[in-house]
Image (spheres, grey):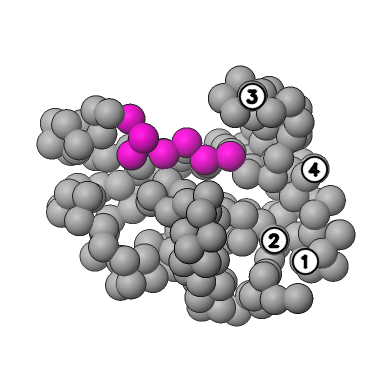
Amino acid sequence: MIKTELNISMEDSHWKTTLPDVEKISHTVLETTFAYVEKHHNLNFLPDQKNILVSLCLSNDQTVQRLNKEFRNIDRPTNVLSFAALDDPDFAKDCKLFDEIELGDIIIALETTQKEAVEKNISFADHYCHLLTHGLLHILGFDHRQDDEAEYMESFETNILQALSIADPYRE
């Protein structure tokens, strides 16, 4: 079983009032996601017996818009951004050199997440869990640029969320 650690930074204090148990929820999503992926997907790129670190930043639209513009050349906020260490050419070398492996960073925007939850008529907590799951899958190497990749990733999201007692976000 992969050993994981979640480092949470709360850049916007409104997260605590919007979702008071966000830290506990985040750790549960992390554990559920890694357990499911480990069982159903090849993670042999992750070294055995090393702690896997994931950084989560609970932020706001302003910060996410700035990052989205800087790194994706899109000048608007989005719900979640993921920066996978797998994309770094030195990732494999770093896995051998260090005792802990930094897998990546996930940043979630509060206002966009709130707005989308209202638009979808779902709870903020459920939508947050979906976005965190989505971000975690990205830093584990999943993508959705091609239709087959999207279908594969969405099936993982759906099954992980089901394990968390959350309805399928892709069901019409």
In this view, the residue in front, 93 or 9, is 93
Q: CA distance from mark 4 to mark 1?
A: 14 Å
Dot 3, how many residues are within 10 Å of its Cα: few (below 14), some (14-19), or many (20+)? Answer: few
Q: Which mark is residue 111?
A: 4
| Residue under the point 61% across and 20% down | 70
Which of pointers 4 and 3 lies earlier in the amino acid sequence? 3
Which of pointers 2 and 3 lies earlier in the amino acid sequence? 3
Q: Residue 128 lies in magenta, yes or no?
A: no
The amino acid type, in three-letter code, at marker 3 is Asn
The amino acid type, in three-letter code, at marker 4 is Glu
Identify the residue position indicated by label 2 in the image: 127
User: Quadrant where the N terminus lies?
Assistant: bottom left
In the rendered image, which quarter is residue 127 located in?
bottom right
Element assignment for label 1: loop
Dot 2, how many residues are within 10 Å of its Cα: few (below 14), some (14-19), or many (20+)? Answer: many
Dot 1, how many residues are within 10 Å of its Cα: few (below 14), some (14-19), or many (20+)? Answer: few
- The stretch of residues the image draws in magenta is 81-88
Please indicate whether residue 45 sits to the left or right of residue 96 in the image.
right
| Residue under the point 79% across and 68% down | 122
- Residues at circles 2 and 1 in contact by the CB criterion of under 8 Å: yes
The amino acid type, in three-letter code, at marker 1 is Ser
Element assignment for label 3: loop
Q: CA distance from mark 4 to mark 3?
A: 20 Å
Element assignment for label 4: helix
